[in-house]
Image (cartoon, grey):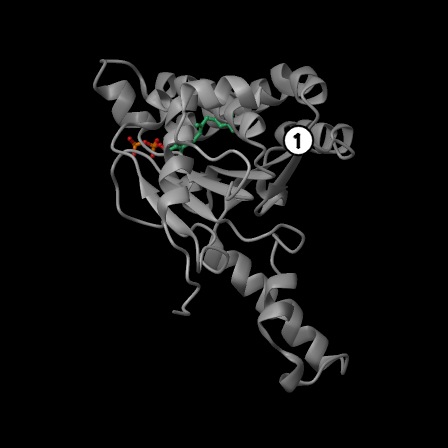
């Protein structure tokens, strides 16, 4: 597989400097649909196809984690029709991908306020997470009903409770304890953050975790995102010199 990729992308170094974790803000589904005179949900459906593409590309590249911003805390305020269509799409995705995830050895995880999901969506999600928990090739993390501020607030509450209960002292609170109290406790920080549709915003996504991530903005809308775009982002990433604040 590496041989075929080297042919397609001769300047990509597949042995070094592959990001461990890529996080993606999948934006522009609505605009993609509107520009074609289609209902917004058609844009989300087409976006689900791009999700399949990035899983395949990520696996080929040997990326360990891909986190996708599938539904934000703020998305609950969209019209009821769009919210339920998105939940249904997620369920369909989980149902139709279940076998593929097993065959491709993909582990599924989810972060966010998952208790807010409709019972049927939560049930399907839990089933696929459980079924794929021992898979080892790549971890796909779906951020659903996710908001970074909410995540940090919840972590702060837990830490404050530990202090009140006398389990820790204020001086014990450090960056590691905060990181370990987030939904992403066992997930390495993203090395690369991709956002589609040209918007220059973080939209309450992994604010703590992306402190040192390299950021790539693609002008194209998410439904047009293909494997080659992920390869391009990784090639570009390999050209950047990450200093983590040092010289
Ligand atoms: C942002 O586009 C996208 C979303 C709110 C939903 C993302 C969902 C999918 C790609 C499909 C389902 C996901 C999985 C994991 C199967 P937008 O609607 O904000 O676009 P706009 O800014 O153009 O209106």
What's the residue at 61%, 53% (across, down)?
Answer: 183
Is residue 37 shown above or below 129? above
What's the residue at 62%, 68% (across, down)?
Answer: 176
Between 2 and 79, the one lying in front of the other is 2
Residue 207 found in image quarter:
bottom left
Disc 1 target residue: 125
Left or right: residue 50 compared with residue 97: left
Left or right: residue 128 compared with residue 85: right
What's the residue at 44%, 50% (across, down)?
Answer: 205
Q: Is residue 142 visible?
A: no
Is residue 51 shown above or below 209? above
Q: Residues within 10 Å of mark 1 (few under 14, many from 20)?
A: many
Residue 83 percent coordinates (x, y):
45, 30
- Give the quarter of the figure containing the C terminus: bottom left
Label 1: which secondary element: helix
**Quadrant of the image where one finds ligand 1:** top left
Between 202 and 66, the one lying in front of the other is 66
Residue 182 found in image quarter:
bottom right
Left or right: residue 245 compared with residue 57: left
Q: Is residue 23 visible?
A: yes
Is residue 129 shown above or below 98? below
Between 163 and 6, the one lying in front of the other is 6
Tell me: is circle 1 under 8 Å from ligand 1: no
Between 227 and 37, the one lying in front of the other is 227
Residue 107 percent coordinates (x, y):
68, 32
Residue 230 percent coordinates (x, y):
42, 30
- Give the quarter of the figure containing the N terminus: top right
Residue 101 percent coordinates (x, y):
66, 22
């Amino acid at each position: 597989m590496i041989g075929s990729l080297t042919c397609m992308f001769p300047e990509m170094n597949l042995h070094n400097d592959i990001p461990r974790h890529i996080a993606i803000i999948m934006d522009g589904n609505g605009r993609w649909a509107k520009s074609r005179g289609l209902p917004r949900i058609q844009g989300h459906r087409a976006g689900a196809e791009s999700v399949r593409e990035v899983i395949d590309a990520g696996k080929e590249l040997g990326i360990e984690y891909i986190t996708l911003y599938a539904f934000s805390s703020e998305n609950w305020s969209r019209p009821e029709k769009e919210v339920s269509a998105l939940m249904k799409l997620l369920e369909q995705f989980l149902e139709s991908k279940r076998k593929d995830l097993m065959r491709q050895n993909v582990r599924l995880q989810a972060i966010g306020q998952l208790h807010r999901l409709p019972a049927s969506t939560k049930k399907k999600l839990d089933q696929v997470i459980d079924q794929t928990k021992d898979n080892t090739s790549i971890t796909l993390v779906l951020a659903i009903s996710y908001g970074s501020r909410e995540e940090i607030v919840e972590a702060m509450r837990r830490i404050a409770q530990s202090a009140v209960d006398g389990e820790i002292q204020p001086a014990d609170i450090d960056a590691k304890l905060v990181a370990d109290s987030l939904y992403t406790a066992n997930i390495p920080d993203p090395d690369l953050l991709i956002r589609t549709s040209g918007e220059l915003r973080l939209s309450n996504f992994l604010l703590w975790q992306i402190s040192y991530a390299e950021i790539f903005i693609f002008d194209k809308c998410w439904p047009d995102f293909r494997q080659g775009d992920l390869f391009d982002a990784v090639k570009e990433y390999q050209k950047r010199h990450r200093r983590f604040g040092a010289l």
